[in-house]
Amino acid sequence: MSSTVSKPTAAEPIKVALLGCGTVGTEVVRLLHEQADDLAARVGAPVELTGIAVRRPNKHRDVPAELLTTDAAALVARADVDVVVEVIGGIEPVRTLLVDALSAGKSVVTANKALLAENGGELFTAADDSGADLYFEAAVAGAIPLLRPLRESLAGDRITRVMGIVNGTTNYILSAMEATGSGYAEALEEASRLGYAEADPTADVDGFDAAAKAAILASIAFHTRVTAADVHREGISAVTAADIAAARSLGRTVKLLAICERVTDAGGDEAVSVRVHPAMIPKSHPLAGVGGAFNAVFVEADAAGQLMFYGQGAGGAPTASAVLGDLVAVARNRVASGRGPRESAYAELPVRPMGQTETAYHISLDVADQPGVLTQVAAVFAEHGVSIAAVRQEGRDHEPSASLVVVTHAAPDAALRSTVDKVAGLPVVREVVSVMRVEGEEQ
Amino acid sequence: MSSTVSKPTAAEPIKVALLGCGTVGTEVVRLLHEQADDLAARVGAPVELTGIAVRRPNKHRDVPAELLTTDAAALVARADVDVVVEVIGGIEPVRTLLVDALSAGKSVVTANKALLAENGGELFTAADDSGADLYFEAAVAGAIPLLRPLRESLAGDRITRVMGIVNGTTNYILSAMEATGSGYAEALEEASRLGYAEADPTADVDGFDAAAKAAILASIAFHTRVTAADVHREGISAVTAADIAAARSLGRTVKLLAICERVTDAGGDEAVSVRVHPAMIPKSHPLAGVGGAFNAVFVEADAAGQLMFYGQGAGGAPTASAVLGDLVAVARNRVASGRGPRESAYAELPVRPMGQTETAYHISLDVADQPGVLTQVAAVFAEHGVSIAAVRQEGRDHEPSASLVVVTHAAPDAALRSTVDKVAGLPVVREVVSVMRVEGEEQ
């Protein structure tokens, strides 16, 4: 192939429309202003704000009033807009606005995880049809450079696993439960009081936020379109102080994990498994030490081995940093008449249902302290084809009950669930104290 | 600006010349072969090896014989070569080969840290003149995606600090000294025996390797050309078991760090400080837990806050993963008639000499156990304008000596050195047991 790359000559400014001006948007405006000279030098042309679409212009005293408009569609359609930066969130009207922008050949930078996890394919198709760029580093793990490394740095490798703490609110709550021994409700209340949880924490605590991010991560890692609906999702509201205590007694800690795996069936066919659920991980695992509102993502690839990315997963400034990084990239591409990487979904791997996905369980039982209990319990596991990795049975002084902890080897999740149901019904089992998946062990 | 991005149409193969076929090169050949279909799908065109330049073709039984040549210059000059991948290492003849390739408009992917730290400017100029790509992720921290995040993800942010463990050999040796209490010589011998240190370990243990990487990191982080000669360099051969013990007694550990800082003088002028030296860091610091042959780099930026990147810093497969990621990127750019980010050295910040760089010292002394010793020692610090952060003096049973540990606040390195020299000469000081800089503390 011949090299026909043209050198950048124009110092014509790159014109940016900003959609939304909340915490992140305000930081984007501030950074664009404060770092104007640096950005121009890095891009090879000035980067200018053409307009900012907001719902209530009188609420935004800290940004130039002449840039504000309530008509987002008209702003996106303006002929002098090269790039649209979207930090509104949600599906509509954003979906329509961004598809229109991309169809018109305007590059889009977005932090909208829900939209990407729901309608990513439509956005990518619009981008490809017009040759526009679609960048979205800020949608997953805030300031942590994660999507670019997965999309680009590891483009020559075969990613087998992405496992991460991608939601700061739930990580804060679980860290607090671990530190204080408190229950879920109490820790959530404290998190709300300190501003780490929203007034309606559903999106965070029920795992919707993490599931959207998992869908995006799996799509990129495995070159396959994965939507939020493909993600098995369990939140943290069922995590008890007993779960945390059980984990601690075994040198483990409880984290809400987004897990994306490349799996192979007996016939050699590949599939992907994508799930969000709380799990126990060993204290020695690199993710175990990630506390409070931080995020971290652990990646495994055939040639690269194990990698970890760590940083602030949310907040105005960190998210704005990721948005600005993307903005510089798409602006550079404009200046060089090039474009960034396109969607890569050629592999089209099927998504394996959760029931068939292999996981390992930690089960803590309160059982009658009498002979034959372990035999009865173990028989249920064997019946379901679930192999036991470790057992710990301990009597309690002056009580007719004992604690029985079973950790399994990996087995299909459906078999594990049936096993637990059956075990719970055994007359010798007084209570199922804790059931939780185990991740990050050397298998 | 109008959008005139052309869509990729050609499935013409991207032709690659490989220079060097050692541990990394062999892995590159293997991955190119094994993942040919995936790479073609990700690039949008097949990626083909045109030739492999080696010194002794009969030594390479594991690669296709018809691709081997001893004439690297002729291979680079071939009209059907689009991309040159260099994994030979060293300055010449590589420098000439790569400048020739870039000048001819061929994209270059290299893992050559020494060359980049020495002659990076020349290579970038050649790339810019022809519009070719120059990628070098594998040159720093092996498989860890680090340069792309710094060059691209953080392009809209202001990086203030990059601090990392970027040499696996020295980290292995220091980890072994910490674990076993052994001295430097013994730990080095063990590392050599196990293959973690080369027969001539100079480049690693004297910090040359880390210094080259520091120069590359500083150049990218601060948009300023920094060469290896600008880097203050101290290796680990002077680190003693006493240093390690002193660190441990204070809840610290000793690491060889590459540190790149953006500094501001009293007049508000910015400069960069780039240095490689062993330092004590608190056990609670994210870098403290990075053991053995792993690498990790801690990055601080104004908006993004603190980030950490962790993974395997060396080895054939991990390094090849980074090379392949770059190869996919430059090949994609060819297919899309675009190009990647150019050198960004517009800031041209001066490099602050080490003597003027502010550091903090940990000094462990063996002193006479008599009244007035602390007063005399403290007076020397005050004389040099060095403020003391913490002091610990402990007598020893049945001995006429005491242990005196002083940790300073940050002060110019030259003042700290003079202080240590003067203190060492005090009659009440029997021995300077350990002197080491302290990093990663909350100031």
Image (cartoon, coloured by chain):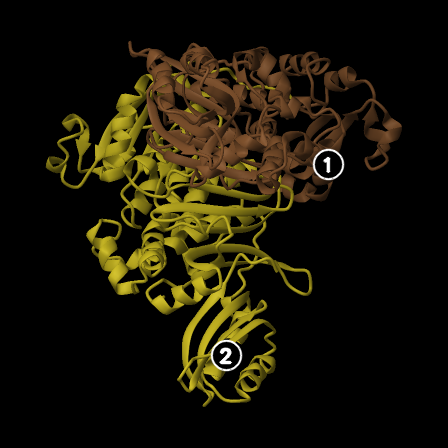
Chain colours: A brown, B yellow
Q: Give the Cα separation between the discs numbered 2 and 1.
A: 49 Å
The residue wearing badge 2 is B418
Disc 2 crowd, CA 10 A, few/some/many (<14, 14-19, 20+): some
Asked if A17 appears above or below B423 in the picture, the reply is above
Q: Find numbered disc 1 in the image and state the secondary structure of the residue it sits on.
A: loop
Closer-to-camera residue (A209/A421): A421
Callout 1 amino acid: Gly
- Residue A266 in the image: x percent, y percent? 29, 11
Asked if A313 appears above or below B347 in the picture, the reply is above
- Residue B321 in the image: x percent, y percent? 35, 33
Closer-to-camera residue (B247/A322): B247
Classify residue A17 as left or right of residue A176: right
The residue wearing badge 1 is A195
Asked if B306 appears above or below A257 in the picture, the reply is below
- Total labels drawn: 2
> Which residue is located at x 58 percent, y 20 percent?
A212
> Which residue is located at x 33 percent, y 38 percent?
B319
Image disc number at residue A52: none
Asked if B273 appears above or below A72 in the picture, the reply is below
Chain of the residue displaying label 1? A
- Residue B295 in the image: x percent, y percent? 40, 46
Q: Are marks 2 and 1 on the same chain?
A: no
**The N terminus of chain B lies in quadrant:** top right
> Which residue is located at x 58 percent, y 24 percent?
A210
